[in-house]
Amino acid sequence: MRGPDEDVLDPTVREDPAFSPVLRSLGEPGSVGLVPTPALLCDVDLLMANVSAMQRAADSAGVRLRPHAKSHKSAWVAGLQLDHGAAGLCCAKLAEAEALVTSLDRAAPVPVLLTSPPAGAGPMARVAALAERCDLALALDHVDAVAELVAALGTGVTVTLLCDVDVGLGRTGVVGPHAALAVATTVDRAPSLVFGGVQGYAGHAQHVAGRDARRLAVTAAADRLSEVVAALEGAGHPVPVRTGGGTGTALLDIEAGSLDELQAGSYVFMDREYADALGSDPEACFGQSLTLATTVVSTNQRGFVTVDAGLKSMATDAGPAGVPDHPGAAYAFFGDEQGMVTTTDSFRPTRGDRLRLVPPHCDPTVDRYDRMWLTRGDAVVGVVPVTARGRSY
Ligand SMILES: Cc1ncc(COP(=O)(O)O)c(C=O)c1O
């Protein structure tokens, strides 16, 4: 990555005087200590290593990587992934895709796969508009949704449609081959649609602890997807792409051979929940690039200090944050604005000290921040906007 230049400097940081001290010291040792906390920090070298490692894993297995942008919501990170050979991006929501397509400055239209189904005439009209601005594919799970999309599409725009298949998560997706055949047949009858294959996202398998147990979950999901693929092909619907997978299963998905395209997202950052689930498995090869900077604000009690990162600073669905630099210390939520960090004999921080925390769950934590500070060692080397922050509609 280049050094601290305008390419990696979110221009909005200049509008807030709170950021002036760190901006004046960009690139200097110790400048991380000047970032107002709580703040999202990203170690650029670890991030780049993660981006390369997943791309290498996909390339050497002969599968495409279409990373999920829901984890980072950043046009800058998406650009890195595309530069490293990603076949396109996945987006979870329409507004996320709209924001990233607007911000990504690429020579060719960006291939975007919308992985969650929109519903209703208004959202489908936005799908039609988005299809004019990128190379759009989307996954739907019902013939009525397909009909709704066809009604929204004008002439001259073609959208690739994948059939979303429930492979065990139960969140979205057709249940069984019969419904998949109905979707594929409806797509074949619509001149504005091209049948692109199937999506089978095994979200329930991603955080299964223990590699053997995770492999079993992957195999069961692969079997469900294969049953649908066989039925489609048997009925004369070629299935060009089988897309799915996430950080916890990507290497096992490769081993199972059931996917042509991987949608992993969290691998760019990682988080405490993944660290717990993956232990020392091969999937734990991705480094913890994302941390939260927090400041000790009160030290009047025995056994713990109070820091300025609380419920508003991170997603709370996956338990507490990690305290990576101080073995034996633990974080606990302490209300909206504060957290508690326990002290040990060798770790007694004082007021004003800075600590790093590992976010429990990266995606919804990133969504709480306008920007991400890029670091190398203890220097801030850039700052990038979380482009699609809050764009969940
Ligand atoms: C449809 C879909 N694909 C891929 C992913 C990426 O999973 P992970 O962030 O665990 O790599 C997600 C995450 O929730 C998802 O919902």
Image (tube, grey):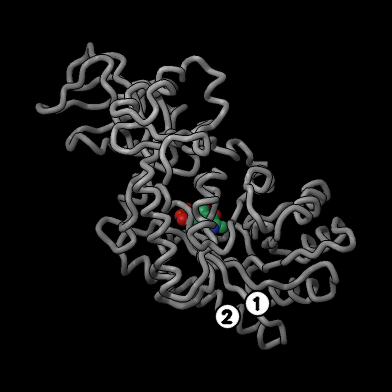
Farthest residue, direction top: 300
Q: Is residue 370 above or below residue 301?
A: below
Look at 47% across and 33% down and name the residue there: 383
Q: Is residue 372 visible?
A: no
Please provide percent x and percent y for residue 367.
Answer: 53, 37
Please provide percent x and percent y for residue 230.
Answer: 61, 84
Q: Earlier in the sequence, mark 2 or mark 1?
A: 1
- Tell me which amino acid carries mark 2: Glu
Tags 2 and 1 in contact by the CB under 8 Å rule?
A: yes
Farthest residue, direction left: 345
Instruction: Give left or right: position of 175 versus 21.
Output: right
Look at 49% across and 37% down and name the residue there: 8
Beta carbon of the mark 1 residue lies under 8 A of ligand 1: no
Task: Say which element carries label 2.
Answer: helix
Please provide percent x and percent y for residue 186.
Answer: 80, 72
Instruction: Give left or right: position of 179 versus 285.
Output: right
Query: In the rendering, which numbered label is found on residue 342?
Result: none
Farthest residue, direction right: 155
Number of numbered callouts drawn: 2
Q: Is residue 170 above or below residue 379?
A: below
Seen from the viewer's position, the closer of residues 192 and 224 is 192
Q: Is residue 181 above or below residue 87?
A: below
Label 1 packing within 10 angstroms: few (<14), some (14-19), many (20+): some
Seen from the viewer's position, the closer of residues 305 and 97 is 97
Residue on which the image places disc 1:
177
Q: Is residue 162 visible?
A: yes
Label 2 packing within 10 angstroms: few (<14), some (14-19), many (20+): few
Image-quadrant location for residue 250: bottom left
- Tell me which amino acid carries mark 1: Pro
Residue on which the image places disc 2:
227
Image-quadrant location for residue 295: top left
